[in-house]
Image (cartoon, coloured by chain):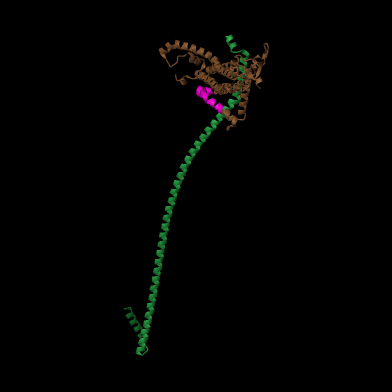
Chain colours: A green, B brown
Amino acid sequence: MDELLTQFGISGPKFIAQVILFLIVYAVLKKFAFGPIIAVFEERKKAIAESQANAEKIKKQLAEAEIRYQEILRKANSEAQHLIEEARAASEATTQKHLQQAIKDAENIISKARESVDLDRARMVADVKREMIHLVVDTTSKVAGKILTEADQERLAGETTKQLAA
Amino acid sequence: MLDSFFVAAALTLDAPAIIPSSGESFFDWLSNSVFVSFVVSAFIIWFARQATKQLTVVPGPTQNMFEAVVQGLYDLIESIVGSHMVARAFSLLATLFIFILVSNWFALLPGVGSIGWGKDTPAGFEVLTPILRPTTADMNMTLAMACVFMVFWLYWSISEVGIKGFLDHIFGVKGGLTGFMALALIPVFLFVGVIEVVSMAFRPMSLSLRLFGNVFAGETLLSTMITLGKQLNLPDWIAYALSVTIPVPFYFLEILVGLLQATVFLLLCSVYLQLSTSHDEEEGH
């Protein structure tokens, strides 16, 4: 066995030196290289996982916001429709009210005008009657050539009035 | 120029001390391969420090390269040894891979095996004791790595599955057999266990010899190709031209072999670890 080892150049001191050297490299790399690098890997993995979780959260929030937005939009549409309907109804009611008022005002104006016309007509008729009676009395007195008494004048006026009324 | 033609030394199995001495010396342990181990270790540690000095979540070029290597190794090792063992075993297995890879590729640098003490010969200056020798072409190094791994392997295996579980892995009746069949097969599995123990005992040797043999053969191949012209007694200028051109394809081959051997060493160690630390429910047999 010793011969075999010697043949391959294996010797205790050299072997131990190589073992020590290799263990030093292993210890240094483990402490100063692999440990920190793996810690960075873990940190990066954690950051990526967090980012993914955040992305998922944001996606979920976005979906919820979209639903809320749609809901608000639907509600706003509904309210707007309702307002339009109300405005339309109010407008129609106002129009009707104003129309009725206008009709009423017009009727009042017409009625007043008619009353005024009637009064004027009655006054004119009365004036015409009075003028006619006066004319009949004057004409009769001129034709008869005498001055008519108060009683004659009243009788003539009464007869004239009766005939005009007929 | 041709008068000072260098003849690279053919590798010897024994790695000589870089400080030649006539008798016993305290520095006999400082062989040329131990010296290269120093250099390789220093380079790896320096590079790792450069890469991890100022770690940031968004990495710079050096950190990015180192992270890519570490991440690749981590995923590979995790896929073999499982998530329960990767945190414990990763550092050692990754160090093995990186150390072997850098050592193998360091061996291809100009000057390794061709600078050192030697003598003038009619063919030129012949290097007899190179200062730099591929450290993975020295059995001391490959055996050291294999032994270190086997010690950790034994510790991790026992701490992971317990002594009973460890022995059960080796000698236990496998295949989920129970009852009479299990009893009947106990002697068979005991015998298989003994074979398994022998196989385990040879693992350091097989791991180290495989790596040593491949790198040693590669170095010998390159050395042969470089000195081919001289060995064929061709004119100096042809031998010089051949020594530059012929090894080129073999250098590419050795770059590949260096990576391959580091990977093989890593994979075998990972598989050994996985076999002895897998729990029954994970074994699937």
Question: Percent from the top left, x then y, of residue B276?
Answer: 50, 18
The answer to whether any part of residue A150 appears in the image is no
Question: Percent from the top left, x then y, of residue B195?
Answer: 49, 12
Question: At x 43% / y 56%, what residue is drawn?
Answer: A90
Instruction: Specify whether residue B73 is painted magenta.
Output: yes
**Magenta stretch: dominant SS?**
helix
Question: Furthest residue to the left?
Answer: A166
Above or below A154: residue B195: above
Question: At x 54% / y 25%, what residue is drawn?
Answer: B74
Quarter of the picture holding the C terminus of chain B: top left
Report the front residue among B275 and B227: B227
Instruction: Specify whether residue A77 is painted magenta.
Output: no
Question: Percent from the top left, x then y, of residue B156?
Answer: 54, 18
The part of the image, by quadrant, that contains residue B248 is: top right
Question: At x 55% / y 31%, what residue is drawn?
Answer: A44
Q: Is residue B4 left or right of residue A70?
A: right
The part of the image, by quadrant, that contains residue B53 is: top right
The part of the image, by quadrant, that contains residue B265 is: top right
Report the front residue among A83 and A32: A32
User: How many numbered dots are placed on residues in this image?
Assistant: 0
Quarter of the picture holding the N terminus of chain B: top right
Question: Furthest residue to the front?
Answer: B235
Above or below A113: residue B214: above
Above or below A62: residue B116: above
Report the front residue among B99 and A87: B99
Instruction: Tell me the magenta residue range.
Output: B68-86
